[in-house]
Image: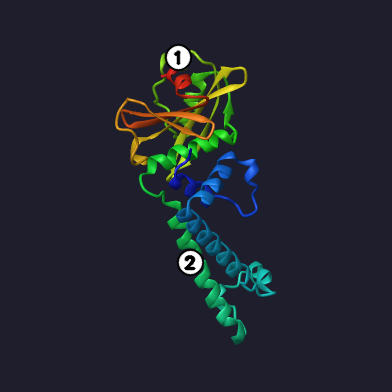
Amino acid sequence: MITREQAKDILSTRRPGSPAAADPELAEALRLVEREPELRQWWEEHQRFDAGVRAALQAIPVPPDLAGRIVAGRPASTLRLPAPRRWLWGLAAAAVVAFAAWLVWWSQPAGPQFPTFRIRMARTALREYRMDIQTNDLAAIQRFLAQNRAPAQYALSPPMQALPGLGCGILRWQNQPVSMICFDRGQGQILWLFVAERGAVAGAPAGREPVFASVGRLATAAWSEGNQVYLLAAVGDRRLLEKFL
């Protein structure tokens, strides 16, 4: 069961017209909207604002000779608009500023960052994010991450060390790299491990005692060790993850 804040995070990244049936978490968030009046009001306001920004941006007029002037290298200050259209440019400029402010505001997680970090990493796994490299060599995975300045000095439990690798990917969180290491559990099942610098994820677990939570079909366990925060995820339940900790 997702929380109200998690639902907001999911809905705020939804693209207009994207089908809910293709994303189980999106469908769950929309069901929560129907049950909670406060969340429904937020969602309606969000959609109205979104539609207003899109309409304002679409209304920006493009001078017919703009492409030619750009190619000719003429400075933007030489453009002259007929007087009746100048108010439209003012409106468009205001819309762009509002849109930029909206992007900055919505990019900030509501409340502690860690719950949002957890759901974003889990959604990446559920969407079958493509790995940057595919290999069963865990040492090669570690070298690749180090060469690309992603967290690579992570500690694996003996059960994880015994699993063959599948590959890895490098994600971003708050403009910081996050290492995603994929392990083969057999029978087409994957174990995901996300590693980030602890300072980049506010509100992360303080110690090595794992914190368990479910995100859609995934069970997750999170903990911190040294200056890094770990998030382990797999399709299943808590008992499955405990085998790898």
- Rendered residue at 56%/48% (across/down): 30
Mark 1 Cα within 10 Å, few/some/many (few <14, many 20+)?
few
As helix, strand or loop, the secondary structure at mark 1 comes to helix
Query: Residue 197 at x, y = what percent?
Result: 37, 35
In the rendered view, tell whether residue 15 sits above or below residue 241: below
Residue 156 vs 223, above or below: the answer is above
Q: Nearer the viewer, residue 22 or 61?
A: 22
Residue type at tag 1:
Pro
For the point 68% across and 70% down, the residue is: 68
Graded by Cα atoms within 10 Å as few (under 14), some (14 to 19) or many (20 or more), the crowding at tag 2 reads few
Q: Residue 172: which disc?
A: none
Check disc 2 and give the amino acid type.
Answer: Ala
Residue carrying label 1: 159
Sequence order check, earlier mark of 1 and 2: 2
Q: The C terminus appears in which quarter of the rendering?
A: top left
- Say left or right for 240 vs 57: left
Q: In terms of depth relative to the viewer, which is nearer, 17 or 178?
A: 17
Instruction: Name which residue lies at 30% across and 32% down.
Output: 206
Does residue 209 appear to the left or right of 95 in the view shown? left
The location of residue 99, given as percent across then percent down, is 50, 63
Q: Is residue 237 left or right of residue 86?
A: left
Q: Residue furthest bottom?
A: 83
Question: Where does label 2 land, which residue?
Answer: 98
Q: Position of residue 166 (x, y in %)?
A: 57, 22
Task: Estimate the spatial distance between the alpha carbons at disc 1 and disc 2, rounded to whole Å.
Answer: 50 Å
**SS at mark 2 in the image:** helix
Q: Nearer the viewer, residue 194 or 21?
A: 21
Residue 71 picture location, percent across and down: 66, 67
Q: How many marks?
A: 2
